[in-house]
Amino acid sequence: MPRFYRFVSLKLWFLIGGLVAAASYGCGSSSSEPAEPDVPTVDSITVEVETVGPGSSFTTPHEALVGLAAEVAPPEFAGEIEWTVVDEPADYVRTPVPQTALEGAETWFLVPRPNATRWASVPCPGALSQKSLALEITARAATAADTVVSEPEDVRQDEIDTVRQEYVDLGRRTFPGRDRFEPRSSPHFKPSELNPTGDYNVYWAEQRMLDGLEALRAIMAERFQQAGLPFDGLILTSVFRNPVHHSYHAGLSTTESRHQYGLAADMRIWGHGMTREEYFYELRDAAHDDAVGACFEPEELIRRGSSDGQTLTHAHVDWRESCPTGW
Amino acid sequence: MSKNSCKLLTLTLLALTGAACTPRARAEAEAEAQADSIAVWTEILRSGTLVQRVEVAGKLAAEDPATLPPATQEAVVAELVRVGEALLYDRPIEGLDELDSESFGEYYLDLAVTAAGFGSPEANRALVLSVGVSRGMQRRVARLGDEAIPMLTEMIARDYQPADALETLALAWFWADTTGAPLSDESRRVILGQLTSATGSERYSLRRAAATALELTGDPAFLPLAERFRTSALEAGERLIAADLEADAIPALEAAAAALAAEELAARSQRLLQLTCLDAAGGPKMDVCGWLGEQFDRALEDLRAGRAAAAREAFEAIVRRAAEAGAAGALSEDEEALIAGGARKVLRRL
């Protein structure tokens, strides 16, 4: 969305101030003095910044284009405009700035790629000001007699583009569209369950995972009911993980975990009134149902991955793209 | 679209196409870069550290498996077999201690699901050790028929994905019955043995899987075994197993029985008898097998000829003799349940 700022030149303010002062202090007689020759001046400059993403947001190197437009009054000074792009000073992120000179009433630049190692020091959950890229842009028009500078205009990544930037910076194979982070939930799984990390308010939950989780829950609920056992629902321990949380906060070495793509859920297997094995095998059986259509991590892999190489710690279910289901 | 949006779109297009002279040149450059990457990943999968292999397996899994070059497919299959066998035979896996708690599981899933996408005979054979991943994986392996049975049996014996191996055996039975795909008597004998022993196993994983596996066979001749298993599960307080049998397996097998003519149902029970008797090498079991086999032949002949009363008499004799053999120890309790129970099911239809 474009934003406009109008800033009237200092010289015009001085002129207005001078007229007021003359009226107050009786300097009207100065009109008898000979008039100075007219020097052309810039009255105002209006800046418009437009990005590919909504809300003046962007990602880089995709969607990194920032369009700049300035309107100057009077318009004959449009060719005199110079742009200044600096790292937005109020946040904690060092955003790289374009190295080329930007001139003219209409121009554009590409936001350079940031240093990806910055993510290693971002705390969990961290504030947006510690994560999002932001630049401050001003336009300047100058004549021999006058200089006018626009109000600074910020271009800053919003929360969705900030988390999308993680996928680029951490070299993930898939770069999600903004629509992936539209709010999604299902009757039995609230956003707080689907997004337990707290790094962002937005999260990625694919519809097929939500449908699969609902189907899994329904099968489990029915089984427990048939057996006359209480069912407390599925307890999700980890669902969406943004790449920075996955790699740095959780310290996990896989780069393509389906948790980052809204396609995987870990579940608690203890505390259900039966042994871990019994609950795990109930989940396994339900996850293999065609209505769920999931990939399930076999018991042996979970045990091998545990700290002692033996404990069945959790159940992992995912809905990865090519998980074989039918015949 | 506003005037400025139009300008921005134009600029975007200019910026995007600026990297290469023409769209074709750009596509070629991208394809070349991709091929280079896949070639590098393939080499890492063959000879990299486990940490490196975990990373490239994730990248390969993001590609369309069918488009991966033969050398890459070969490397994925080889690695899947290597890791699977290490798990099956409890061999150490170099570099495993350098991985975090989740990465090894992700790695294995990436390899297995990627290999499943190849569809080649070699890849499908490699999936035997991955039947725990999904029902689809089990089905893929079940279609291998005789070829897969020994390894699946070994997996059960070694307690490696035993529940999934058992279910896959049941699916192999189902696949052969419904499509006419070959499955040898020896394989069927092994499957029958695994299913019956699983219902009485000390391992919960196997007992739980047995309830589902009986349903997956789709063979109503297993109905008496399922009913007997439900009773024993209830006695053992295993309510989830009993409930699954009650709600799913038994109704499904009853429906399958109802869909068959009495003659076909009897033939299914006779088949189980023949398989049961394959390992009878002399002694009381051989005697009872011989007698029961003849009686089944007679009963089926009477059924085909429409002599219902004679057929009834023959099936009643089968029930009595199987019970006697069970009491005398010539047949196991499960064998007795299958044979006598099967004859009773036919009797109800007469």
Image (cartoon, rainbow, N blue to C red):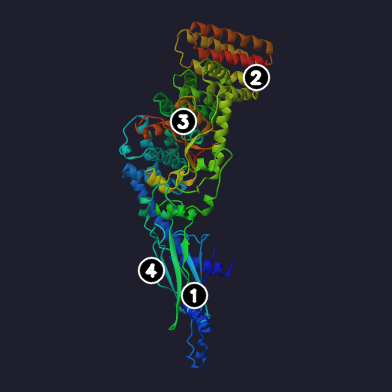
Q: Earlier in the sequence, mark 4 or mark 3?
A: 4
Point out which mark residue A269 bears: 3
Residue type at mark 3: give it: Ile
Q: Give above or below for B129 relative to B313.
A: below
Residue type at mark 4: give it: Gln
Instruction: Specify whether residue A287 is in view.
Output: yes
For residue B47, what is the image quadrant? Answer: top left
Badge 1 crowding class, 10 Å Cα cut-off, few under 14, some 14 to 19, many 20 or more, is many
Who is closer to the viewer here, A32 or B246?
Answer: A32
Point out which mark residue A99 bears: 4
Residue type at mark 2: give it: Ala
Task: State which quarter of the image contains the C terminus of chain B.
Answer: top right
- In the rendered image, the residue lying farthest to the front is A25
Please report contact status of discs 4 and 3: CB closer than 8 Å, yes or no: no
Q: Give the alpha-carbon distance from disc 4 to disc 3, as whole Å.
A: 54 Å
Q: Give above or below for A43 relative to A216.
A: below
